[in-house]
């Protein structure tokens, strides 16, 4: 499958599925701004909690990390991603979180994408 990079975020590689965040009509401009802000911090500082705070969490499942972005009206967007090397991260899956816990389906999708891409 295709992978993508954003020029300003050279340490981040996106699966085709995760790259759809910037094309989704459900993502409002405010959420899109917050997404780019969080991605910039991830690109510059990695998983350092001093910069991302509660927006980042290690899931303890298949080495997956969760990047959380809150939009308007209590919407919460998520990226599931993996740490590839010293400063490189693979963003696997992007979705709107609707329940208290991340669904098994979302974890399975991220794991399937990671396997497909060899990450």
Image (cartoon, rainbow, N blue to C red):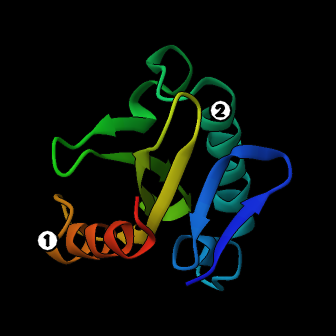
Could you tell me which secondary element the residue under label 1 belongs to?
helix
Residue at 62% x, 57% y: name it: 13
Q: Is residue 15 shown left or right of residue 119?
A: right
| Viewer-nearest residue: 76 or 21 | 21
Q: Does the rendering let one see residue 27?
A: no
Image coordinates of residue 31 in percent, x first then y, are 64, 59
- In the rendered image, is residue 45 in sight? yes
Residue at x 48% of width, y 20% of height:
48
Mark 2 vs 1: CB contact within 8 A:
no
Which x, y percent locates residue 104? 13, 71
- Return the residue nearer the eye: 114 or 91: 114
From the viewer's perspective, is residue 100 above or below residue 67?
Answer: below
Give the mark nearest the N terminus, 2 or 1.
Answer: 2
| Mark seen at residue 43 | none
Rate crowding at label 2 as few (under 14), some (14 to 19) or many (20 or more) other CA atoms within 10 Å: some
Q: Secondary structure at mark 2?
A: helix
Relative depth, front residue between 35 and 106: 106
Quadrant assignment for the N terminus = bottom right
Name the side, left or right, on which 114 lies relative to 32. Answer: left
How many neighbours does mark 1 have within 10 angstroms: few (below 14), some (14-19), or many (20 or more)?
few
The residue singled out by tag 2 in the image is 41
Residue at 21 percent across and 62 percent down: it is 102
- Which mark is drawn over residue 104? 1
Residue 119 appears in which quarter of the rendering? bottom left
Q: CA distance from mark 2 to mark 1?
A: 27 Å
Q: Looking at this rendering, what residue extends furthest in the top direction? A: 50
Q: Across the whole image, how many numbered discs are drawn on residues? A: 2
Q: Residue furthest right?
A: 7
Task: Classify 118 as above or below 63.
Answer: below
The quarter of the displayed image where residue 38 is located: top right
Q: Position of residue 80 (x, y in %)?
A: 38, 57
Percent of width and height locating residue 82: 40, 48
């Amino acid at each position: 499958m295709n992978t993508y990079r954003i020029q300003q975020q050279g340490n981040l590689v996106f699966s085709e599925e995760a790259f759809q965040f910037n094309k989704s009509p459900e993502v409002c401009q405010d959420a899109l701004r917050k997404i780019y802000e969080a991605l910039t911090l991830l690109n510059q500082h990695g998983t350092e909690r001093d910069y991302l705070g509660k927006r980042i969490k290690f899931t303890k499942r298949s080495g997956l990390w969760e990047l959380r972005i809150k939009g308007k009206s209590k919407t919460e967007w998520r990226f599931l991603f993996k740490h590839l090397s010293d400063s490189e991260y693979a963003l696997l899956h992007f979705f709107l979180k609707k329940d208290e816990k991340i669904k098994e389906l979302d974890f399975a999708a991220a794991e399937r994408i990671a396997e497909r891409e060899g990450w």
